[in-house]
Image (spheres, helix red, strand yellow):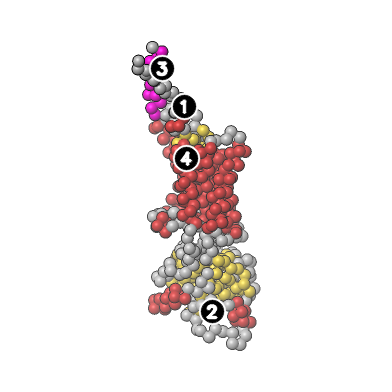
Amino acid sequence: MRQRFLVVVSAHTPLKLFRLTRLRLRLLLPSIALIVASTMVPTELRHPSLAYIRNIFTAADFVSNLVVYMPLGIALSGSSLIRAFLVGLSLSTSSEVLQLGYVNRDPSLFDIASNTCDAVVGYLAAMFWHRATGCNPVSLRVYRPLALAAIPVAIFGTMMLLFHRPRSDFSNWSSTFHLATGNELTGDRPWAGTISEFAIYPFAMAQSQISDLNSRRSGSYPSEPPIVSLAPTGSGRPLLSKPEELRLYDTLVRTNQFTLLVSMRTSNLEPSGPARIITYSQDRVNRNFTLGQIHNLLYFRVRTPDSGTNGNDPALYSGPVLSLIRTFIVAAVYDGRFSKLYVDGKCVAQVDLGAKRPRLPGRISAWIPGLLPVREMELGGAQILFSALFSLGILALVGIPRRLSTRLFAGAIAGAAIGGTTWVFGVSQPSLGIRILLECVAAGLVIVASVEADTAAPPAPGSSLLSRLDLHVKARLRQ
């Protein structure tokens, strides 16, 4: 007698392996964190002044404002239009007021209006989407396999940021820039004061030489003559002819170091914007080097592949060293790696332009649109994004703890893993490493506080078919 064996297929146990359980990411807290991270976290501080307000509208500002403030309006679409308007206005106003005291920030009334309008546009777009599709975009549904894929993405992305060789040469200098004093050639960075004379030498002077020059000791002047030595008149105009500019460019790019000596006296400690004392540049955002003034501080920017086209990542800032009562001998020195400022023979600031800092691979950064803030993405934005993705992936892997304290602990650990790895392997400056670590931990906390299980997730595809198969097999067994 032949015996038949029937295998009972249950629709309940196997489905747990294939069910696409989803997570729900509420957008309000991440959208606020995006605004805070991109507009309210300072890199350098200055004395607040209304003189820094620049009511100028640019396409780059419009794009960045749209990217930053539209998510806020979308996240508030479950509320009212008035609330979206007031929250956007409050955050934008707070950001612009704080930027009065932030170096390299240009607060603007236009930005306040643009940011508020972008929040309203995001709200209206979300309401249109909700009415058209029936889906409320205040939160984002994420399939668990997609969230799990965020773990390798975060790990691989972090590795790409770390392993690069810092470059602090002049290979990205431009020979078309012009040497000028007292202002940019565009006329938007005026400096009030007098320059008795200045000279540019194609080598880095030692501190002892600079001290001797300041004390006017005999035999203290360098044996090699300067490339440029002038007593300039006027401001914001090219000082050299085209052949002289090419000679200056070729000499400095070949030596990869220089010393700028200036005898100067300022007549205003409240300049409008970072004022240009001596600049070798094209406009306010593209330069080879610049010596300038911010209140009673001096700053020195040198363009390298790592410091960026504006030479401000990082720039060098002194403490309060200027006054209205006398003439100062200022020396700005770059030796191929370190940038230094001397005032009357004393070193007042220095920065290592060859220090290890996270960088996007050249093949990736070349594809990024020029309007996007690539340097900010490299020095914070990318690590914050990878920390958020890693935190999301961890929750998808181990589940969402019910206790908020446990969730926050998991987010802090995930953020610390990305930030700590970046610090140890990709950063050689402790202050920058601490900043990146704190930003990554904050990103992890924001994500875990915003994620919840999607209880409205539909059954997995094919589950009804398996259920019918189960009932059919059980009926055959009962016969």
* Side (left or right) of 408 relative to 150: right
**Label 4 vs 2, first from the N-terminus:** 4
| Mark 2 lies on residue | 197
Q: Position of residue 74 (x, y in %)?
A: 47, 39
| Mark 1 lies on residue | 13
Quarter of the image where one finds residue 413: top right
Q: Amino acid at mark 1?
A: Thr
In the image, farthest residue toward the front: 1
| Mark 3 lies on residue | 474
Give the Cα separation between the discs numbered 3 and 1. 16 Å
Describe the element under mark 4 as helix, strand or loop: helix
Q: Amino acid at mark 2?
A: Glu
User: Which segment did they paint magenta?
Assistant: 461-478
Asked if residue 476 is among those painted magenta in the image, a careful observer would answer: yes
Please state which of the two labelled residues, at mark 1 or mark 4, is closer to the viewer.
Answer: 1
For the residues labelled 1 and 4, say whether their Cβ atoms are less than 8 Å apart.
no
Quarter that holds the N terminus: top left
Q: Which residue does the image show at 41% across and 26% down from the upper left? A: 463
* Side (left or right) of 369 relative to 340: left
Q: Main secondary structure of the magenta part?
A: helix
Please state which of the two labelled residues, at mark 4 or mark 3, is closer to the viewer.
Answer: 3
Please state which of the two labelled residues, at mark 3 or mark 2, is closer to the viewer.
Answer: 3
Q: Amino acid at mark 4?
A: Ala
| Mark 4 lies on residue | 147
Describe the element under mark 2 as helix, strand or loop: strand
Quarter of the image where one finds residue 17: top left
